[in-house]
Amino acid sequence: MVLILNRIVIQSFAWIILATFLGTIMYLFWKVVGKFVEKCGYVDINYFIWKIVILSFVIPFSFMYIKKIEKIGMYGFDFYNTKLIVFTTNFLMCIWFVIFMIKIIKFVCPYINIYQAMKMKGKTDDQIQEKVEIIAKKIGVKRNIQVVILDQIKIPMAYGVLKAKILLPNRVYREKELKYILYHELTHHKHKDLLWKLLENIIHCMYWFHPCFKDILYQIDQWRETHCDMEVSRYISSMKEYFSTIIQIAVEERNNNAYMVGLCEGAQLLVVRMQRMEIYLEKKPLRRTVTVIIGMLVITLSSVTVIASTKGFANGYEWVANKTASKEAEVIVNKKDYIEKQRKYNQNKKIVTKKETLKPGTMEPIVWDVPSQQRAQTKSFYLQKGDNINITISVETEDDHEETEVEIGMLENDQKEQYVEKGSEFDHIFKINKNGYYQLYMENKSKDKVTFAGAYSVHEKDEEE
């Protein structure tokens, strides 16, 4: 159970690291290329690519690739959980989780407040509700959108993922003003912008440590509003009157929420939206060509990034695992020295080895180059009755000799070899029958240098069962 939990934590850590790298590359790419597309007036393309950027932080492209190449030992990649890796990943993931939960709570609280206010003090207006149904039918919104009038808000906004609503301040509206407001907020519901904004904010809570994430949210908010303006322009006769209405509302005090999409997000964004709509209305019809080119660039970049980042991570992870494990485990002894040590032991009747505990669930990798006629041993570690130690080893020589002679086994307290196997592949579970200190050993009896590669781990009896 401990081993499984450690692997889950390590793999979750790998997921976040790889997704952070891919998402950052996509963000930097579109931050540059998007300016060109913006000048061409392609609002829908820009909004779509920014959605791809945000999704690249959660869709595990790189993680799926690293799982595909995952193998054991020297022949590929494996999530070896050495002591250093287990401690580091557990420590970092605990910090990440605590801050993630704090961010989630801060994110949810305003939504709860507005929900309670709407439930206790929300009002309806039959005339406005009738206009909503007419406009919704016109623009193709099939959901039942309810209008709620609240004193607690200052600007109109779309609200709700499951139960869609339009929230309006408690004031008197002119007919055209109300029409533009309803077109805008209903279009947000049509595009499922509330669901996207919910997803974006959850991802933001996940990547609270990312220095560029606020700008990513700012960019996608910009293009969401511009995309909505573009859709509304197909149903109204005057964009000038439309933006005049928004400007009048923009000067009012606003009280927005992460679950809501308001009619205006500030003066600066409003100016950007007006400039983009002006370019959009004058753009040349090159949409299909531009879309194909950009799509190919995004696919190529993401593919190269996934492959490069995954291989880089795998190499770095294996390097750390091998370095941290070999310093703790590898003890190469000459065969003659070992025999002499064993003879002295039989005379003195005592163990002269370093005592250290190998915690259940901890996997230790082995990549040992053992010269001819020499033996490699782990340090002595303490095991309890009922524990099982699993060892999987592959043996390789420089010239791939099939007649390679090796011995792989475990030493008990009394230096007795409990189990020995000769061959090139080794996979065995040692059953521990009594408390004491044990060592694993690999001996090279052939004429050439031999590489032992694999891993060993300890499991408690309950885990195996």
Image (cartoon, grey):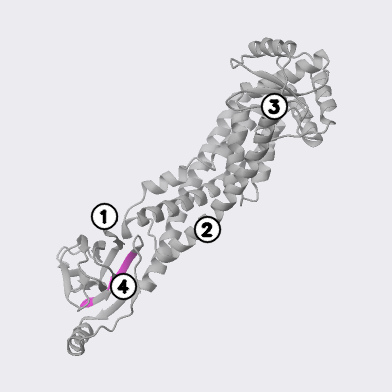
The secondary structure type at the circle numbered 3 is: helix
User: Which residue occupies 44% across, 55% down?
Assistant: 10
Residue under pointer 1: 464
Which quadrant of the figure has residue 150? top right
Residue under pointer 4: 381
Left/right placement of residue 67 relative to residue 21 reads left
Q: CA distance from mark 4 to mark 2?
A: 27 Å
Amino acid identity at mark 2 = Leu
Which quadrant of the figure has residue 81? bottom left
Mark in the foreground, 3 or 4? 3
Residue 414, image x and y in percent?
A: 19, 79
Circles 4 and 2, Cβ within 8 Å, touching? The answer is no
Residue under pointer 3: 120
Range of residues picked out in magenta: 365-374
Compare marks 3 and 4 and give the one earlier in the sequence: 3
Label 3 crowding class (10 Å Cα cut-off): few <14, some 14-19, many 20+?
few
Q: CA distance from mark 3 to mark 1?
A: 56 Å
The secondary structure type at the circle numbered 2 is: helix
